Structures are given as C-alpha cells and as structure tokens.
Image: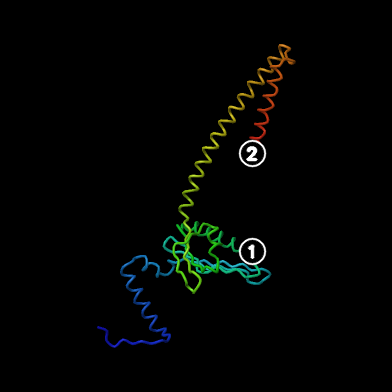
Amino acid sequence: MLQKMKIAFEENEAFSDMLTDKIKAMNNKISPYHKAVREEGYVKHLLLEETRNGEFAAGLDARMFWNCMYIDTLYVEESERGTGLGRLFINKAIEIAREHQCKFIVLTTFSFQAKDFYEKFGFYVVGEIEDYPPGDSYYTLRKNLDEELTDQVQMNKYNALRFEQFESMLTSIQEEHDKIEKEMHNLREENKIKTVRFRESMSMKLGYERMLDLYEEYG
C-alpha cells in the first residue's frame, strides 16, 4: 500500500538529479562498463567543425566508449546543405571510429530529419518509436564497422585470386605470342611470307600484341 505519495506537476532539478545518481550507483554495482565510463578519460570526445569565410558551416559532436562511437549531433547550416559537407563529416567520423577500433556507430534521428541520408552510408534502423512526435517517428540507427572489415578482407582475397588468374592468362598469351613469332621467323627463312599460314600467323600475332598492350595499360 502506498503511503504519503506526493504528486507534483513541476520541474524539480534536485529531485531528478537524485534519481539519476541512484540509478548510476546501481549500475556501477552491476555493470563494470558503466562504472568505467564514469572514470575521467574513459570516454573520448570528438568535435568536428567547418567554417566558410569565417562563419560556422557545419559541426559534429560524438563520443567513443564501449567499442562504439555515439554521434550526438550533426548539423549543417541550411546554406551549405546539398554541397556534400554532411557527407564529408560522416565519412570523417567513420574514418576516426575505425582508427579508434570502434566496432559500430550509433545515432538517433527523427523521420523528418536525416534517416534517408544516414542509410546511404550503411546505417540501418535498430529501433523506432512511432508517433513521436505525433505523425512522425524517432529512430535509432546503427552502422557496423567490423562487418565492413570482414567484407574488405574477403574482397582483398577475391582480388588477389583474380590477379593470380590474370597473371596466368598473361603468361599464356606471352608464350603463344612468342611461339607465333618463332613460326613466322621460320616461314620467312623458308621464303613463305605470301602463304596463307603466314597471314594467319600475322593476324594471331597482332591479336596477342593487342592483348599485351591492354594488360600493360590496365594491368
């Protein structure tokens, strides 16, 4: 049974701080990560700012902890939107997150803000509060970085295999080219340069030389 419950419709900062402190104390006992994050220097802060002609153009505010980068705010002045500045900021944040061994990035946005923009960079929705505010949604988005590294490793292996196959093909082409040259030399020695075989050999030699030129240009 409740006793002496107080109900008030007013802001009380001291009361809110007390509740927060109690939650933090409980979390510190249960989770070593929560306790660590309160230690000085554990959270790394990131601030990015761009100015144009001495005036603020865009800014990003983020924190890194628990192998994660949490982007609190990204803002681009209206006059700078559509110039690619936001894209540069996100790419720079992703680059810095990787440098600090973050495994993923988290941010939040409203449906009327930049959800579609973030999704272009590989962010995906992990949480949605519908009708908040009425008629809109509030999203939490995540971008995995460790999966991208795995994909890159696989791509590197694939490219290495393709390069090996390409080198093998080049060797075969070079060998065939040398055989044709030798055969043409023998035909010349036998004074058979007007024969069908010599013309066929010349055509094949030119074809192989074109392949070798392409390899030298693009290989």
**Relative image position of residue 216 (x, y in whole percent):** 65, 35
| Mark 2 Cα-neighbour bin, 10 Å: few <14, some 14–19, many ≥20 | few
Residue designated by label 2: 218
Describe residue 5's horizontal placement relative to residue 98 as left or right.
left
Describe residue 25's horizontal placement relative to residue 191 as left or right.
left
Q: Residue at 33% x, 66% y: name it.
A: 31
**Relative image position of residue 100 (x, y in whole percent):** 48, 58
Amino acid at dot 1? Gly
Note whether 123 is above or below 25 in the view shown: above
Q: Residue at 42% x, 87% y: name it.
A: 10
Describe residue 52's horizontal placement relative to residue 129 as left or right.
right
- Total number of numbered labels? 2
Q: Nearer the viewer, mark 2 or mark 1?
A: 1
Q: Residue at 36% x, 79% y: name it.
A: 19
* Residue 113 tag number: none
Callout 2: SS: helix
Per the model, the C-alpha gap separating discs 2 and 1 is 35 Å
Residue designated by label 1: 82
